[in-house]
Amino acid sequence: MAERNRQLEAANQPILDSVGDGIYGLDLDGNITFANPAASQLTGYSQEGLIGHSIHELHLYARWDGSPYHFIETGMYQTLKQGIAKQSDSDVFWRHSGDHFAVSWTCTPIKRGGEVQGAVLAFRDITQRKRQEHQLRDALAEVERLRDRLQAENAYLQAEVKNEGRFDSIVGESPALKSVLDQIDQVAPTNSSVLIIGESGTGKEAMARAIHDLSPRRDRPLIKVNCGAITPTLIESELFGHEKGAFTGATKQRQGHFELADGGTIFLDEVGELPLDAQVKLLRVLQEHEISRLGSESSLSVDVRVIAATNRDLVEMVENGTFRMDLFYRLNVFPLTVPPLRDRREDIPLLVNKFLADQGRAQGRTFTRLTEDGMELLLAYHWPGNIRELQNVIERAAILARDQVVPIAPHLVNSGISSNDEPTSSLPGFVLDGPQDFVSLAENEAFYIRRVLQHTNWAVAGKGGAAEILDLPASTLRSRMKKLGIERTD
């Protein structure tokens, strides 16, 4: 039979010599009986180094990573032992020089009288094809990653559109507000971290939006995260993302908020609610500009500006051990304190006009102004809920209004929530006595104004007068005194 194979090889020698693919003749033991010139060129072996040697020992003794590859596992073995043609493009052939190349091969049995006598193996170098396939897979993975990122960013943009008319703009001309806006102008062009401090409802998110919009990052997204609204077990996944299978329910890879904010700004509202383990990871981002998805051992570089906000006393939390000192100093590079509404009462009429216009658009109606009494009530109220509470009051009043001029019923501005910073606290010796639950708002207001006037010896206008203490125009205070029947009796 060997003689017959040699005769066939001699007859087809010109064809075998001219093809670019490597071609081997194999006997039943996998030894090479013939090799064309292309086979020698591809593998680096001479004809003498190939003929009579096992293809397993020469080329198929190890996989890509160098791990052992037993000959019985190869498709060529199945061809020789079972007479079944096999092919593969997932193997490598090792060269004489010790390196390897990706190979595509086809092994066809040679039979005589139904018995397998040997096989013909044709192979070619597909390293370039494999490289292109890897590049294509990487490109497709990158496209998939960018698609997911764009979808997530689009979701955030849609949420921004839905929030149009809430706190996406800053309204006011008071000195307290202008001081904050001046600080925003100074810090916005930088990459410094900003810590916005203020009571709930003062518009901290609007301040963060202003900083982002005035920064060089304005064309990239502002990603907003309410740290207090995320379940503690999911905070790490939400902020930094996770890999598929990282935990039960993680059915696909997910980008976190920091990855989505790459090149832009992340706004961490209620940052004081972060658990300590998440604080450690946040500190790493600020220090090293790197994140690791949950379930991943690799790191990703991110370029993100951090703006944090809180209505809690972080200094006290640091002293209590519930907030990391090193993270506090990283976030507190540029502290920005947002004044409460009671410290910027001159802005109330401007805010009222904005919210009335918003409600007019929302309800398809026209509202021109508040009643005079209604505005006076708003100016005298202590606003524990700040701008958010004012917006809610205007919305309720607009719903109840039957005319273009909107009245404010006293019960609309009586939330039942007290404030440690309401105007009474700044008046020396002023103490509310009597069961306040059993007096009307007008009676309480009259009692308060009268005590302020007593404190100023009934001076209404001028420096140190009642109007200045109440933060009201003198004409408004006189009108209110007349309406409430407040007169000097001594």
Image: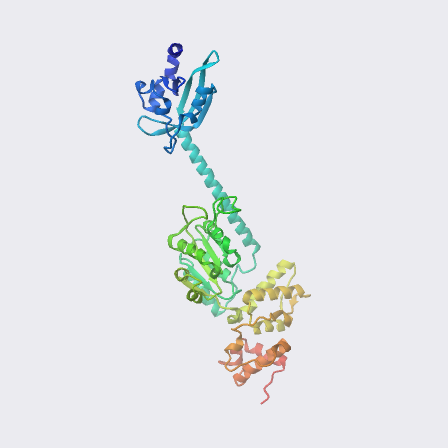
Query: Which sits in the foreground, 170 or 342?
Result: 342
Quadrant of the rendered image containing residue 298: top left
Kindly give the residue lying farthest to the right in the view shown: 402
- Which residue is rendered at x = 47% and y = 20% of the image? 82
- Where 355 sits versus 52, above or below? below
- Where 311 sits versus 481, above or below? above
Q: Is residue 98 left or right of residue 253?
A: left
- Where 126 sits versus 477, above or below? above
User: Where in the figure is residue 70, as x and y percent of width and height?
Assistant: 40, 27
In the rendered picture of this protein, how many numbered marks are placed on residues? 0
Q: How is the model colour-coded?
A: rainbow
Query: Which sits in the foreground, 488 or 122?
Result: 122
User: Where in the figure is residue 346, as x and y percent of width and height?
Assistant: 53, 71
> In this rendering, does residue 479 appear at all?
no
User: Where in the figure is residue 17, as x and y percent of width and height?
Assistant: 36, 16
User: Where in the figure is residue 220, as x and y percent of width and height?
Assistant: 46, 51
Q: Quadrant of the N terminus?
A: top left
